[in-house]
Image: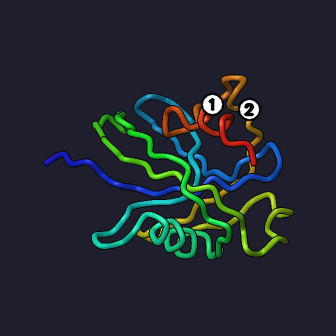
Amino acid sequence: MPHIRPIAIAIIRRGENILVFEGHDPIKGETFYRPLGGGIEFGERGEEAVLRELREEAGVELTNVRYLETLENIFTVRGEPSHELVLLYAADLADASLYGVELLNCVEDDGSAFCAMWQPLDYFRAGNAPLYPDGLLELIGQHQP
């Protein structure tokens, strides 16, 4: 049965770049990007979820975590309808040396590997690829670091 999935994601900036992962929807033929984060577990606060998800997926610790806003994301991926409530948090990497790393090796809950990378916000503003969830790019423009 379809359900609404609550998630928390971290907006981590390096100047005019944002830390994201690349996804691909083969049905739409679309490559897209999204900041790191994931599902909020029952009884877990959004901030706790974003800290846990970044620790589990990327092996990183966050500091200066601050709530920004909630976005509602209704979309189709791989032909399946989805609905998310996305809690957005701005955060900093605790290990400042990671700001100099171009690719960050990460791992999904199922053990599959992926990389996070720094992408310039202008890449998304120019329409080169979508940044999800919808509305995120505009929101980032309202919350300058």
Q: CA distance from mark 1 to mark 2?
A: 7 Å
Q: Is residue 9 above or below residue 130?
A: below
The image's colour scheme reads: rainbow
Per the image, the residue denoted by label 1 is 129
Q: Report the front residue among 35 and 116.
A: 35
- x 65%, y 71%: residue: 62
20 versus 27 height, above or below: below
The residue drawn where x is 73% and y is 43% is 144
How many other residues sit within 10 Å of disc 1, few (<14), some (14-19) or many (≥20)? some
Label 1 SS: loop
Which residue lies at the image location 55% right of the left edge and 50% below the top edge?
Answer: 68
The tag on residue 27 is none
Helix, strand or loop status at disc 2: helix
Q: Are marks 1 and 2 in contact (CB under 8 Å)?
A: yes
| Residue designated by label 2 | 123
Q: Amino acid at mark 1?
A: Ala
- In this rendering, the answer to whether 83 lies above or below 65 is above
